[in-house]
Amino acid sequence: MPSTVRGLEDVVVGATRLSRVDGEAGRLVIGGFPIEELAPAASYEEVLFLLWHDRLPSRSDLAGLREEMAGLRTLSDGTLAALRAAAGARLDPMDALRIGVSTLPLANPELARVELQREPALANRARALAIVAALPVLVAAYHRLCHGREPIAADSRLGHAASFLWLLGGARAHPARVRALETYLNTAIDHGMNASTFAARVIVSTRSDLVSAVTGAVGALKGPLHGGAPGPALDMVVEVRARSRASGRSLDDVAEEWVRTALRDGGRIMGFGHRVYRVRDPRADVLGEALETLAASVGADGILSDGRTVELATLRVLHEHKPGRRIDTNVEFYTALLLHSLGLPPSLFSPTFAVARAGGWTAHLLEQIEEDRLIRPSVAYRGGADRRFVPLERRSEAGAAA
Ligand code: ACO
């Protein structure tokens, strides 16, 4: 049998100019800029422009992009009807988002166009922008419907991050909250050949359309090993905090016990470990700093310091549990603390990740369209051989089982 690589670990499947992940050094570079420099300073639109055009936008570029996006923040009646049906069935917000994305061509059939390799780059970017702009609108509309509230119209004066908070809550958010969300969105916008990006690239490599690719990416992001980790990570901190308060025992003690029990039950600790990073995920520190800045402006409920205590206890136990493995904190742990501090409930954590990653997904899709090479790896066969077909009428139950 030819040699195989489980999970394609360390396999280089292509080249990108979008982001560089150095798992040994714990460095992330987006479009040539270290994440520590870019994420806290730029707007989401600036980073999106950087990914799509390989340069920072001028003032007029940015104004044009913001205006174009503002005009795209509406949902068709068909999409709203689908979201209402999803809310009626109490679907997980990631399922509703997946359904919502796949309905976008109802209003704009152009979004389902295939063979984009034949289209001008400008037209493909316009399609991609319609999807990126729609994602927060879908997430916020579904969130409101699930809580018995009607979706509200976007305010065209607001940027991507501020608009998302407006659409969720129906109020202008404090600038410090907008900045914190913007930093998060930038931190999560792209990250090498992660699972959802790979899924999206595979789909568009068949010359299929952008909506199909992003729908598939949302499905991949839903999984707890990828984008589904921050909800359980927050649950852990909140539960440890509650038990510590109720029992009078130290947070550190309770956290250690919680992690030992979870590992004994065969569980994984969410927010820790990474396929690529062998050291601390650099995005964790960017988000930790964003959280400190946010707390200094609008106050905090102590989640950051409690989270840090829980993090240290977790790392201690994980290192004991897997002595040979370099398992460290990943971005999702601090994502949980930051989004919680922004007032977002855990049900919005993965959808907000999708809102952020949409920029990276579409940038990769535009790259893949230019690459125009079907992604179709091989697989080693390990099934049976030389079997003889027995017609159904002569097949016994035992024979079928064998
Ligand atoms: N908790 C407990 N054990 C862990 C953890 C963890 N968080 N992470 C790794 N391990 C263990 C695995 O169980 C495995 O043990 P085994 O060899 O006995 O089966 C071993 O360490 C494998 O380690 P790696 O090869 O480093 O991890 P892998 O590449 O297989 O998985 C992954 C990476 C999926 C992220 C893993 O660390 C994990 O499940 N973490 C928790 C989920 C999580 O936080 N996901 C978000 C990732 S960041 C993102 O997607 C944006």
Image (spheres, rainbow, N blue to C red):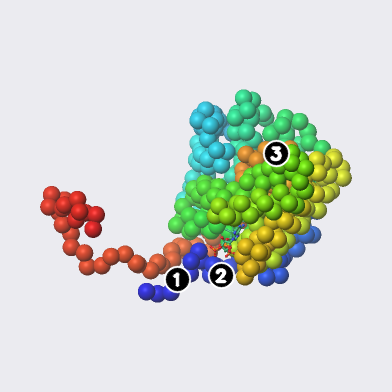
Q: Find disc 1 in the rendering and name its residue.
A: 4
- Which of disc 1 and disc 2 is earlier in sequence? 1
Residue 135 occupies quadrant: top right
Q: Is mark 2 within 8 Å of ligand 1?
A: no
Quadrant of picture, ligand 1:
bottom right
Query: Whole-Å distance between the Cαs marked 3 and 1?
Result: 42 Å
Q: Residues within 10 Å of mark 1 (few under 14, many from 20)?
A: few
- Quick check: 236 left or right of 43? left
What's the mark number on residue 344? 3
Q: Which residue is rendered at x = 64% and y = 68% of the image?
A: 323
What's the mark number on residue 14? none
In the picture, which quadrant includes the C terminus? Answer: bottom left
| Pick the front one: 114 or 42 | 42
Q: Which residue is rendered at x = 63% and y = 46% of the image?
A: 232
Q: Does residue 36 sit above or below 294 in this rendering?
A: below
Q: Which residue is rendered at x = 67% and y = 51% of the image?
A: 257
What amino acid type is highlighted by mark number 3?
Leu
What's the mark number on residue 10? 2
Q: Does residue 298 sit above or below 314 in this rendering?
A: above
Q: Secondary structure at mark 2?
A: loop
